[in-house]
Image (tube, helix red, strand yellow):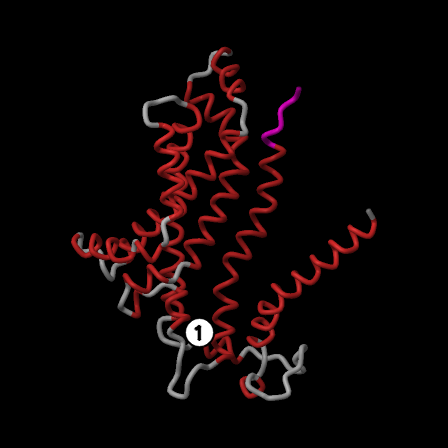
Amino acid sequence: MKERRIGANIIGFVFLVFMGFPVYWMVTTAFKLPKDVLRADQKLWPTSFSLDNFRMAFSRDYFVQSIMNSLIVVSVTVVVSLFLALLASIAVARTNFRGRSALVVMILIVQMVPLTALIIPLFLQLSSLGLVNRLPGVILTYIAFVLPFVIWTLRGFLAGIPVELEEAALVDGCSRPQAYRRILFPLLAPGLVATGIYAFIQAWNEFLLAYIIISSQDKQTLPVWLAGFTSRTGTDWGPLMAASVVAAIPAVVLFSFAQKRLAVGVTAGAVKG
């Protein structure tokens, strides 16, 4: 038993190094001197640190604008998706209606369709609505892309909450909205936070849809801007790594903040037996 645990720890450590090394190299490269980025004798730990790469990244055209575009698009996408998915998941998990099973299967099938197969019809539909090369078009596309996943995930969380708790609240005199607000939502809070994090990461890192829909540089999202990071001499790896570090900060901060909220939500949802 002890040997199995040691073997599992070794395998886990190997995967940690394998997955974490690119992130480590990105961060260290961002803080290197520009002249040291492409040196042949690279070292695992840089001997000098500099913020020149960050200054060069922020001096690039539309970098700050692309950050603001991504924040607007992702924030609206997550809020609207969570609201619509909450209503849909409650309907699917708590009510019986004709076509319920078909709806659940359809949500699952939509998630299985390759994204590349939807690009052309989505683009044509957005073009007919006059939403190509506009942020509202990206937001609508992201909502359609994220919503099935959010509904499916919230449905799983709701299925784990006993319906008897709501029925007991109704017997005690609560209305249906009051039972949802006082019983269901506190228990569902960890699920909402976790689902919101995954929806945020999906929308924040999405590249292909935004690349197809947006053509103007001042309307590009951050992943699209990063993909076009070039100069007259090629790719400036130092500023690119610095910009990538900045792009990763919102997801890291949100996840770190949400970890505490998850623990608080679990405690708030506890009931005395």
Q: Residue at x 78, y 51 (%)?
A: 4
Secondary structure of the residue carrying numbered label 1: helix
The verdict on residue 246 being magenta is no
Q: Position of residue 25 (x, y in %)?
A: 60, 73
Q: Residue at x 65, y 80 (%)?
A: 46
Q: Which residues are magenta?
A: 268-273
Q: For the C terminus, which image quadrant? A: top right
The verdict on residue 270 being magenta is yes
Q: Position of residue 106 (x, y in %)?
A: 35, 38
- Is 138 on the left or on the right of 146, as rendered? left
Q: Would you place residue 236 above or below residue 258 in this image?
A: below
Q: Would you place residue 75 above or below residue 29 in this image?
A: above
Q: Position of residue 244 (x, y in %)?
A: 49, 69
| Residue marked by disc 1 | 58
Along the viewing direction, whichever of 203 and 217 lies nearer the viewer: 203
- Is 68 on the left or on the right of 133, as rendered? right
Along the viewing direction, whichever of 190 and 2 lies nearer the viewer: 2
- Which secondary structure class fits the magenta region best? loop
Q: Residue at x 25, y 57 (%)?
A: 120
